[in-house]
Amino acid sequence: MAAAAPPALSSCATDTMSTAPAVIGVDASRITVANRTGTENYALHLLRHLLQLPGQHQWRLYFRDAPQPDLLPATTNMQQRVLALPRLWTHAALGGALWRDPPAGVFIPAHVRPLFCAVPAVVTVHDLGFRRFPAAHSAAQRLYLNWSTRHNVRHATHLIADSQATQRDLLEYYGATAERVTVVYPGFDAVPFANAQRSARLPGLPANYLLHVGTLQPRKNLLRLLDALAALRAHPSQPALVLAGRSGWLSAPIQQHAAALGLGARIHFLDYVPEADLPALYAHATACVLPSLYEGFGFTVLEAMACGTPVICSTGGSLPEVAGGAALHFEATDTAALVHAITRILEDAPLRAQLAALGAQQLRRFTWEQCAAQTLAVLERAFQLSPAATAR
């Protein structure tokens, strides 16, 4: 599964492209949030690598809060603008800044295009699970996500989808045309996980546990995972289940269901786990299980693979693209298939070793260097900038 190369954007005629170095704006508001999750980490890692690409473009980053000095690399091609406005930051502060001093265009990696945007905009769309599984999202979430996605599709110059699944959903649900949506897979940084196998087990965790990392919410399909664990009650290995993630919308039924099934001490709720502790958490797990109904891009899959941990994941959304043949897959609504996959992992040591080896190979398909280069190509075409302007 090689990452798709950006096609030529038909709306950007090459004979009108600027050959001069340009200022490219970026909405960097999401990279300074506390406890970053998938989309925020995507924005941060991508920006770090965009800033280090060879070239003459200037990157103007717009922040809601001032970033820490070591958050981004120290480069001469970066401008930082902190727009202090607590409310309506995107539509008032960012939109106003783009109007007063317009860059060649603005890239929005993890948010929404301002209502009034004076420059071309490229927006990354991460996840349309709210359309595939509306019952797994609150009414307020559905209302906002549907509006913001429709707004992006209607008004952005070009869209980046982080998986083929997201691209298909944009075409199906919002009528986007294929030539306006480019698939660019995110990268993955395996360095923080390099020594995971030598890390000490986190205190209080059992010797044999299945792991799920992610916010506790309906679309993660955790009630089904609890049912599968209950079905394995009589299995000799008696695996526990560790749920690492903040409590989200409708998380209470997860704890209630665990109690109703009598799972008790076999379930460990860890809440949000700091990034520094994740390698040890993954490395000592028997398997990482993602039963999600839908994932825009499953970074958890790659994190587990980087730690040598076998992965069991559903076929929801992008997960088959991300995991490829390096995981055991099951249909998200098939509890029996999930039980079978877990049983295979518990009982087959050679299979666990094989999946670990395949996972190490799969990781190589996702690099931030590749993601940054492909993203820049999309931006240059959408903003009608000549690629020659990036030459040293």
Image (spheres, grey):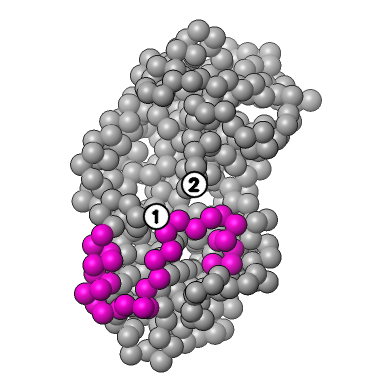
Question: Who's the residue at 26% across and 79% down the image?
Answer: 262
Q: Which residues are magenta?
A: 252-281
Point out the image quarter for the N terminus: bottom right
Q: Position of residue 139 (x, y in %)?
A: 20, 42
Q: Position of residue 75 (x, y in %)?
A: 73, 29
Q: Position of residue 4 (x, y in %)?
A: 54, 44
> Left or right: where does residue 223 sit relative to residue 237?
left
Earlier-in-chain disc, 2 versus 1: 2
* Residue 165 visible in image: yes
Where 184 falls versus 252 (above or below)? above
SS class, disc 2? loop
* Residue 335 visible in image: no
Q: Is-magenta flag for residue 255?
A: yes
- Marks 2,1: beta carbons within 8 A: yes
User: Quick one: which residue is furthest to the right in this view?
Assistant: 392
Res. 269 image quadrant = bottom left
Please tell me how crowded label 1 is: few (under 14), some (14-19), or many (20+) other residues with Cα within 10 Å: some
User: Quick one: which residue is furthest to the front in this view?
Assistant: 203
SS class, disc 1? loop
Q: Is-magenta flag for residue 72?
A: no
Calculate the distance from the C-alpha at mark 2 to the C-alpha at mark 1: 10 Å
Which amino acid does the dot numbered 2 rest on? Asn
Magenta span: chief secondary structure: helix
Res. 22 image quadrant = top right
> Where does label 1 land, which residue?
246
Which amino acid does the dot numbered 1 rest on? Arg
Nearest to the observer: residue 259 or residue 170? 259
Q: Could you tell me how many numbered marks the image carries?
A: 2
Where 220 falls versus 41 (above or below)? below
